[in-house]
Amino acid sequence: MRDTADLQAVLDGATVDPAVLALRPDYRALLLAVDGLEPGASDAAGEELLQRAEASARAALAAGPVEELPHVAAWREAYRAFGAKPQRTRNSLEALLRRAEGGLPRVNRLTDAYNAVCVLHQVPLGGEDLDRYAGPPRLVRATGEEAFDTASGGADVVEHPDAGEVVWRDDVGVTCRRWNWRQGRRTQLTDRTTAALFVLDALDPLDDAALGAAADELVAHLQRSGPDVRVARRVLRG
């Protein structure tokens, strides 16, 4: 198991390419590296959290359409900035908010927690299996040659991002396409994950206090999953 210093070392290597910040100088990423997690299937604590998130989404959407929520609108503009069509490839926050009325997915203990926090705090949030990650996390504009492992029609396939697309990657390939749209299968969280990397993405008008509050709630939930949970955090900004 990694100690806190080891986890912090993982985060110390993380970078955001200046070409990404040129698109959105207001961008910030709050990274959490966590070890000592007790993995498992969806449970009662996660169910309560998801139900709270679903109620929060219904309240938020009662006043108007999802695309008019301030942080969703900001992410739509960010997608347009690198050539993506937000009505076709929705950021993870918008995608979950749209699913909330019919019920958020129940996947596993870790995924349920970060999906719920994403909706509750209206911040895009992704999770990766840290033991399957290779090298430091980097947010870059893709060349178009990077590998991205996913599934299509029930079969495993390797795709490639568009040139100029904003992606998270490690030394092996892309771990998340279009900033926070779709995560790869190689590093996805599973029922066996004991160490994870979480990425919380923020644009104005979401401020640093709100971003920190989302991270605090996620950490509090993760720490309830076992007695030996260790956490390091870092904020990346321009």
Image (spheres, rainbow, N blue to C red):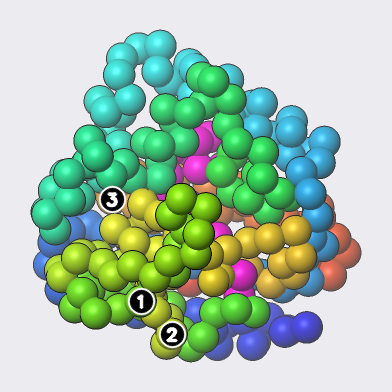
Q: Nearer the viewer, residue 122 or 161?
A: 161
Q: Which mark is residue 172?
A: 2
Confirm or deny contact between disc 1 and disc 2 (CB under 8 A).
yes
Residue 197 vs residue 9, the one in the foreground: 197
Q: What is the x, y in percent for residue 122? A: 43, 38
* Visible residue check, residue 221: no
Sequence order check, earlier mark of 3 and 2: 2
Residue that sits furthest to the right in the current view: 227
Magenta segment boundaries in residue numbering: 117-130
Q: Nearer the viewer, residue 82 or 11?
A: 82
Spatial CA span between label 1 and label 2: 8 Å
Say what amino acid the circle numbered 2 marks. Val
Residues under numbered marks 3 and 1 in contact, where contact means CB atoms less than 8 Å apart: no
Name the quadrant of the N terminus.
bottom right
162 versus 172 height, above or below? above
User: In this rendering, is residue 101 above or below 33?
Assistant: above
- Residue under the point 64% across and 79% down: 131
Mark 3 or mark 2, which is nearer to you? 2
Left or right: residue 14 versus residue 75 is right
Q: Mark 1 or 2 closer to N-term?
A: 1
Distance CA(mark 3)–CA(mark 1): 27 Å
Which residue bears the numbered disc 1? 147
Is residue 61 among the parts visible in the rendering?
yes
Residue 196 percent coordinates (x, y): 63, 68
